[in-house]
Image (cartoon, rainbow, N blue to C red):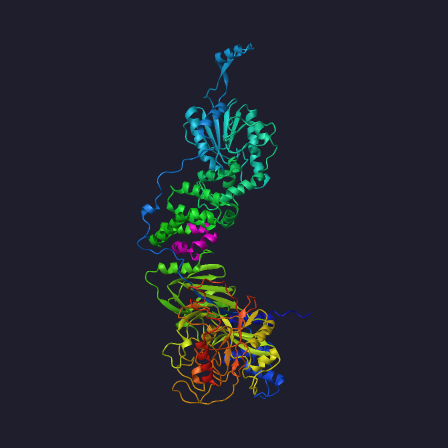
Amino acid sequence: MRSRAAAGHADLLRALITVCGRQPPALESAEDQRCNAIGGLLCFDRLKTVSTVEGSVRSHAASAAGKIESPRAQEPPPARAPLSADLFVLSEYHVHADADAAPAAGPTLQPLTAADCAPRPGGVPHAPLVPTRRLWPALQRALALPRPGALDLAALVGALARARLPRRLPRRQLHPWGGELLVVLDVAHHLVPYAHDYRLLFDEVLRRHGRGGLRICLVEGSPAAPLALLSGKAPARPARQVPAPPAGTPVLILGDLGLLAPGDAASQIGHASHAWHAYLVRLAAAGARPLAWLPASRRLVPARLRRAAQVHCLDERQQRHPLSAQGAPAAVDRSALGDALAALLTRLACCVRVEPGLLRALRRLEAGAAAEPGLEALVWGNRQHVAAGERFCEIAPARVADWRERFREKLQAAEQSAVLREMLRFHAFRGRSTEAAELLIWHAHAGEEARQAFAARVAQARDWFARFALRADAADGEASAYAADLLARNRGDRAWLAQHSPVLAPLWVLSGEDEVPAGLDARQVALALQAVAAQPPSQREFVLVQRDDTLALALARAAPGGSRWPLLRLAGEVVPVRVGRQTRRLRLPADDAVLPLAESSAERVEVFAGTHAYACQRVQRPAWASEIGRDRYGVYLEATIAGVVQRLRWIEPGEFRMGSPPDERGRFDDEGPQHRVRLTRGFWLADTACTQALWQAVMGDNPSRFQRDVRQPVEQVLWDDVQRFLETLRVLLPGAEADLPSEAEWEYACRAGTTTPFSFGETIDTQQANYHGNRPYADGAQGEYRQTTVPVKTFPANAWGLYEMHGNVWEWCADGLRRYDGAECEDPRGPEGEGDSRVVRGGSWLDNGRHVRSALRNWLGPGTRFQGVGFRLALRSRRGRGAPAPEGQEATAAFAGREGAGAAADAAAPASRRAAGEKKGKSKR
């Protein structure tokens, strides 16, 4: 039998990709040729270049139109698309207004002083479970051994007055103290809320009994776990077991007898309770008198414990007499307290810290919970939802978001306000930081009605944090530790971080952490990073480069050649970068080093610098595309549409000056005033006008006047005809939205970063564009007048790889004419109502040089058919996985309106403007 080879073709191919990357290297050197020869021996095919658009068009023309012959004798067979990695493109660009920033330092906002951080005078006294004046008489009766004393004359006289002859003389009952007393104190962690109560009770016992004959044994959760033994005035010593008292000795047990032990399983709770029950039985068998004082209501005490000892409850109604075993439940189900426990945890949700006193105050806000003191131990010992220490507890960081959401949904405005009052009452004496933090947390989750009542206090808290950031710096270790601790304990609360990002972002910068908590606005983080810079940050130009599957950041001067890379203008030395859902701080390279941003698993990368935000998106080749890649013009996509290949260029978002300056020669009035336009989302734009071959493949007809070559642009198409073409195309290209560019998008793409009248410079000639050569621009020389359209890609492309943006055919835009008012605007659109005229741009073969300028505007009715009008296809995403580029979430506009103050033009242009348009049209002809 033939053995399997050690490595197959697929294994070798994977190794080759790992070493050389997915893009095939150019096979030019002798070493490359040798490798290619080896690959041939292994039965690998050499990767070939995909057929060009022109070749595909000619192939279609020969079969479909039959009117011309291909210039080439024989077309090579189409080669398969090369292996290529997914590409990153700059998909979004936003500049946000700084309206919601933290209050600026000035005459009314100064850095914090020591007095601003100091606690307020006074404090909150401890509220015991049972007032001492009521607790002590019951405790004295329980501990003392009653014996008869002197004759009770009052009782005797009373009996005789009622004509009753007593069988024996009544005597006074004495409750003497003294002798042996054993105190067993349970110091289990979940009983921390009652430590102060037991301390008060023990101090009173010590004062009245004295140290003589008094022994104290500390246990942890069970009599089987003794910790220490104290006897008289002797120092404490470790205990191996709880001492056995002599007969008749009272044993005072201060604990829960295991009834409130942590854990949800009945076996966990029962184990501790059974250990206590066995201990009580042993005490009773030895003749001792066990007395237990429990911080719980009677419904939690089963009958077997009541029979084994005198059990008293530390609540305001049941502490006077021991519990009776008659009618008591045989077992206790703590699950009945589930709703009350959840309600109490909900009231704790917005607290930064919860001391035992505050826990008790919040429990007593609701009548049902106020009757069950055991809820405090159930909260303190709830390891799943609560992080508890020896002095305070809090909702566990992993659970804060859930419980704070419940706080918002379940509590009414009055309850939310009552909770905040208790928080402020208990924490006023702790210092202002806790109070300010809790106010902002509470504000992020309270209802609007409750917020209004505390609006002034919340504003003070925001100011406190803003001033804290002004006072502190990275060298202040205490401030940095506080910032890091507060954010770490509340980083799961996205609502708090998002609503108060302007004041919390400087806190994160101060913390020194690299990862930005989810929910904290990265734009505010970028502003905070700039604010702490030693000097105003200078802006530098960086480019996003891609090496195989890795996206990296490099100074523009160090960018690899051979391609146009996305340009980012970043200020400062450190910027926040978000990869997926994780945001971290990134130190920008000071030299020519290339800084990796994201690996192959990242789908989206965002870079923030001050008020600027850039988003990069990973794109994949859709199923209907034959190739996706990057060349010297940037990223391109070749779409196979009904057998015709159309190349599209990725147009990155950015800013440009729309319109023409007042001194531009040949300028029309409607081209000004020139104004800044920001396009926030990228899109795919065909590198040529739609050809007759593509139109005929999709629509089945050819309305063009000039049909000498199917590579010529289609013309004589109505705007309504183009809409039917786009509707058909949406079916053929799943995941993409076929569209026309808006007027702003068209001019942005036409200029390709230039500010001159033409993308080629200050003037133009007929070797660069197809227009009426007998009517040159300005003082230019006359050129050829071709009197027809020419095939696409006849003339050089602009800097972004787009052909014939000047001349050949006018190109329909998606929107109508927008009146310029000089205001900055984002993603402007003109009128788009049914029947509105639409803008056409670029000029045509029969127009003079003046009318093929980048800024020239014209418009036609949607039903107008003209031999010089065509269109250029744009593709946008429907957010599908295979779509060209997903669109990001909606961002806040930086200006007054999304289109600026004067973005929307009137649906019907004034008569004077229409007359100007007619004159312009006549001059073109």
Q: Is residue 230 visible?
A: no
Give the image location of residue 411, x and y in percent: 51, 45
Identify whether 360 is placed above or below 647: above
Identify whether 872 is placed above or below 185: below
Identify whether 381 is placed above or below 594: above
Q: Quadrant of the N terminus?
A: bottom right
In the picture, residue 277 is in which quadrant? Answer: top right
Residue placed most toward the observer, 283 or 569: 569
In the picture, residue 281 is in which quadrant? Answer: top right
Tell me the chief SS of the magenta region: helix
86 part of magenta stretch: no
Give the image location of residue 844, x and y in percent: 49, 83
Give the image location of residue 74, x and y in percent: 60, 87
Residue placed most toward the observer, 554 or 565: 565
Question: Could you tell me which residue is drawn at 41 percent across and 59 percent down?
Answer: 524
505 part of magenta stretch: yes
Q: Hey, which residue is sitting farthest right in the picture?
A: 1
What residue span does the magenta drawing correspond to?
A: 486-515
Q: Is residue 428 visible?
A: yes
Identify whether 707 is placed above or below 477: below
